[in-house]
Image (cartoon, helix red, strand yellow):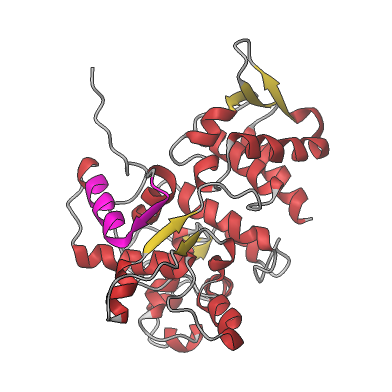
Amino acid sequence: MTIERRPLETCLPRFARHGSYPPKWGWLPKVHAAVRQEAQVFSRPDATVLLAVGSSMVPAMRFWALAFGLIEPEDEGRGAGYVSTERGRWLLDDDGADTWLEEPGTLWLLHWWLLSARPCHVPTFWHLFANWGLSRFSRSELRSAVLRAAQQTGWKAPSDNTLDRDLTALLAMYAPPSPPAPASRASVEELLASPFRQLNILAFDDTPAVSEFRAAAVRGRRIDLQRIRPDGAPAAIVAYACLDYAQAQGHQGPGAMSLAALASDPGGPGRLLFASETLLRRAIERTVSKHGSSLAIMESADGQALLSFGEDPRALAADILTAHYR
């Protein structure tokens, strides 16, 4: 029996709802504070004043806060307001774990939340990081790959223009600007434009394209994706993601998962956090020393390395995350 492959089945069939804007520095704390004061903030006529952004950025701010799982609709009614989620309050309250997103590991945590969400709000991003196999590609190759994945999933095919807006946001979020800003102001401007560039996940190939026009040259440049990042997410964030993924796979109590599966599954921590099986093992071993017998690396009868957890992985993941920020 052949099982139909649906590569984007964990995502919503929506593209470019961010209006081509990546999440900018300060947006998420600002949205959190705003919805705590006023659930209907996004529909207010003075929303641009309250959020201190242009009118086209208001829906983008709402989109990203929803996509990261930091806010949710207040109810299912038409014109509903929004409230902070338990996750949003834990992270962004005045006494939260990282109110102003100053801890470098928080960007990796948000990256994990964005792409591991069920449903994921950014299918183009998910397909690149979680499912696609190429590490070096052009913008047009990625657009074609996402289009094929959407069709294989049974969705109505998005237009090239819609996918281009998605790719614009993806590259603006994770890749350095092209051409780069002058050195005197590059670091500040790049950080404000998108803090996620600090993760160094994507980079443009420095080999110049054969074109006399700058815009054509930018479109023709190759993009490099660092599939393995030895200097990537902190060990506690990696261990948290492994347990979070185990819970998503149906583990509700003590159990175990293969490290090979954690490293290679589409949408797993190895793919989304750019860690090999060796790096996953190293991160878990560093975390084990702080959590005793609840977490361990074991060997199966056939010699496979296993992540073993002695309690509900969701509760253990929360404990690891809290300890990391404490």
Frontmost residue, 53 versus 175:
175
Residue 292 falls in image quadrant: top right
Classified by dominant secondary structure, the portion drawn in magenta counts as helix
Q: Is residue 32 above or below residue 273?
A: below
Seen at 37% across and 45% down, the residue is: 132
Specify whether residue 221 is in view: yes
Identify the image quadrant of the C terminus: bottom right
Does 220 lie within the magenta span?
Answer: no
Q: Where is residue 155 in the image (x, y as percent from the top left)?
A: 20, 47
Residue 78 falls in image quadrant: bottom left
Return the residue found at the far top.
Answer: 301
Seen at 39% across and 68% down, the residue is: 169
Identify the image quadrant of the N terminus: top left
Q: In this view, does 193 lie to the left or right of 107?
A: left
Seen at 46% across and 75% down, the residue is: 177
Q: Is residue 168 above or below residue 262?
A: below
Q: Position of residue 185 (x, y in %)?
A: 58, 87
Frontmost residue, 16 versus 76:
16
Q: Give the range drawn in magenta.
A: 134-150
Q: Is residue 13 above or below residue 16?
A: above
Q: Where is residue 156 in the image (x, y as percent from the top left)?
A: 17, 51
